[in-house]
Amino acid sequence: MTNKIQIAVIGVGRWGVHLLRNFLAHPQVNVVAIVDPTPERLLAVKQQFNLDENVVLTTEWQALKQVPGLTGVAIATPAITHYGLIQNALQQGYHVLAEKPLTLNPVECQELCQMAEQQHLILMVDHTYLFHPAVERGQTIVEAGKLGDLRYGYATRTHLGPVRQDVDALWDLAIHDIAIFNTWLGQLPVKVQATGTVWLQAGVESMYKSSPLPPAPCPSASSQGLADLVWVTLTYPDGFQAYIHLCWLNPDKQRRLAIVGSLGSLIFDEMSLSSPLTLLHGEFEQRGNQFIPVNQKQEVLELETGEPLQRVCDRFVVSILKNTPSEVSSGWVGTKLVEILDALTASLQQGGKPIFLTPSLKKY
């Protein structure tokens, strides 16, 4: 038991409780403390998981300083609190797994990544989709050239709620699809654009802004309110463009992303339980001035089993044991995604003006 990693979970709400479940089940982890501001939540998880009496349950983050041998923390609190919590954790010498986004400000993200590197600590972001078997298999399909010349991509992420009051639909929903496109393409966008529409919370004065210095706590769509519908365009260095449709007042729930190439399309449809990842083969054969579809067939791709979040937690543990950052979802990966969202916010606030991004010096 003494060689196990000692983990504390900070925040056991809707997502944090799943992190707790996975760490409790991990053979190389001891969950030694749980922090949540709501005493009722602490009592609920103690009963739900039949926690040992030795597990510290506290409403105060500072109480973790009294927990002997603590190795790392998993943070699943509102994003606006991430910067302070992660900074304090790193200062205490703890490895950190943070729920996405890393923070809501790219300058803060960079500072935390540099701090982790200087102290030789793991800083990892829970971008769960990057550990999804469909995303991992899809990456191999694209890299193998099975789609031919890549032409464009599109994604739709819609549902009827939940409607956020702290951030718009862009910050609530877009990060997943951007992360998948970046991974499948092996590139980062160099130009972004966003337009949006406000219906439900029009006229709400934004208490958060984009990220001019000094860093603001959180972004928002515009002074007109929080956008319920957002259209995003990402342009990559090779000219590939991806289009993303985001909306939280659409009863038609969709979680669908595709890349289209000259030889076919790769489709990740999370709502399809039987075939979440499909390769649609098909191309044109030109006969005179006619374009005839040929080689058409559908291939449902087999996927490995396993819960993506379990893979996230295991990768965090392995990274700590080997003292090697996760290339898939390091703090620097999370930083680039926040930079992209920040640029999209600037575009949204300026009516869709193109915002250009500088290439990253770090492997994303």
Image (spheres, grey):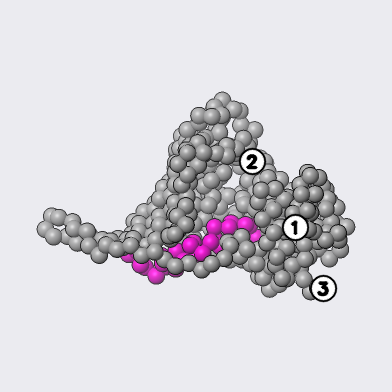
Task: Report if residue 246 is visible in the image.
Answer: no
Quadrant hosting residue 320: bottom right
- Of 131 and 179, which appears nearest the observer? 131
Residue 190 placement (x, y as % from top left): 46, 52
Quadrant in which the C terminus appears: bottom right
Rounded to the nearest angstrom, the CA distance separating label 2 from label 3 is: 40 Å
Residue 343 placement (x, y as % from top left): 52, 45
Q: Earlier in the sequence, mark 2 or mark 3?
A: 3
Residue reaching furthest right? 66
Where disc 3 sits, the SS reads: loop
Q: Which mark is residue 218?
A: 2
Q: Which mark is residue 49?
A: 1
Residue reaching furthest left? 288
- Of 119 and 310, which appears nearest the observer? 310
Where disc 1 sits, the SS reads: loop
Q: Earlier in the sequence, mark 1 or mark 3?
A: 3
Query: What residue type is disc 1 on?
Result: Phe
Q: Can you tell which of label 1 and label 3 is closer to the viewer? A: 1
Residue at point 57%, 44% (across, down):
172
- Of 346 and 99, which appears nearest the observer? 99
Rounded to the nearest angstrom, the CA distance separating label 1 from label 2 is: 34 Å
**From which residue to which does the magenta span run?**
124-148
Q: Is residue 140 left or right of residue 42?
A: left
Q: Which residue is mark 3?
A: 2
Where disc 2 sits, the SS reads: loop
Task: Report if residue 280 is visible in the image.
Answer: yes
